Amino acid sequence: MESQTYIGGELELFQVAENWKQYYGAFIKPHLKGTVIEVGAGIGGTTKHLCDGTQNEWLCIEPDARLEQHITTMITKKELPACCKSICGVLSDVKDKQADAIIYIDVIEHIENDKVELLVAAEHLKSGGILAIVVPAHQYLYSNFDKSIGHFRRYSRSLLKSVIPASLVIEKAIYLDSVGLSASLTQKLFLKQSYPKVAQIKIWDNFMVPVSKITDWLTGYNLGKSVLLIARKP
């Protein structure tokens, strides 16, 4: 496949968001066994947090050759576990690969035809395999930042459920980061930045995310600036 160029520049910025990665990772990591495919792996930041090396294989798929090369370098330098592999392309390029888990972390919103993409994902899942997705929530929060990094949309929980293939059973669909929801609304209404500053990300990650862990639970995971969904293939 011909390499695609990713227009965003936020991947390095969000490397500092360790609390956030650990938070959503706690819901997903118990399912990441056997063969895992990570679609839109970027520069390997998510891989580094979610892959613990116990998997048989962790395949990073990234359509931007420059970003994929960064992951390859991390693997060579042993900054990622030995089970990790990387290819430049999209999921449909690995036609014969069957996985126990396929993950899309802040990726689906970059794909114009999300429903077709997820149909392909369902075909690549083994029986009993899981599909795990994290996406930004609420179209009313769509901002200059979303536009600048190539987001086609933000999702409500119901919208995300509606694009999940009928062959999969949705086990969990929740909102995360209720405190960050107010911060995102402030960003849209008042700051109007194309990109957040590193200091802003650190404040959100170090102070808001830990509080969200409590308030999300108290609100029954019905408020938040992100949606997390887990579906299983029977």
Image (cartoon, rainbow, N blue to C red):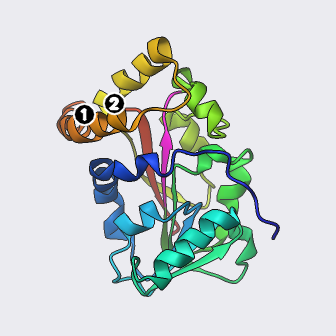
Q: How many marks?
A: 2
Q: Where is residue 186 in the image (x, y as percent from the top left)?
A: 40, 17
Cβ atoms at labels 2 and 1 below 8 Å apart: yes
Q: Where is residue 167 in the image (x, y as percent from the top left)?
A: 61, 61
Asked which secondary structure carries label 1, the reply is helix
Label 2 amino acid? Answer: Gly
**Residue furthest out toward the right:** 2
Q: Mark 2 points at which residue?
A: 180
Q: Is 25 on the left or on the right of 215, as rendered?
A: right
Q: Can residue 126 be seen in this view?
A: no
Q: Residue placed at 20% from the left, 32% from the top?
A: 215
Q: Position of residue 136 (x, y in %)?
A: 49, 38
Q: On screen, 61 above or below 225?
A: below
Asked which secondary structure carries label 2, the reply is helix
Q: Position of residue 19 (x, y in %)?
A: 26, 49
Residue 135 painted magenta = yes
The answer to which quarter of the image holds residue 1 is bottom right
Label 1 amino acid? Answer: Met
Q: Residue placed at 61% from the left, 69% from the top?
A: 68
What is the crowding at mark 1: few (fewer than 14 residues within 10 Å), some, or many (at least 20)?
many
Q: Is 141 on the left or on the right of 96, as rendered?
A: left
Q: Is 31 on the left or on the right of 26, as rendered?
A: right
Q: Is 198 on the left or on the right of 211, as rendered?
A: right
What is the crowding at mark 2: few (fewer than 14 residues within 10 Å), some, or many (at least 20)?
many
State the predominant SS element of the stretch in magenta: strand
Q: On screen, 77 above or below 222?
A: below
Nearer to the camera, 13 or 87: 13
Q: Residue placed at 65% from the left, 46% from the top?
A: 110
Q: What stretch is highlighted in magenta?
A: 132-138
Nearer to the camera, 31 or 178: 178
Indicate which disc residue 208 carries.
Answer: 1
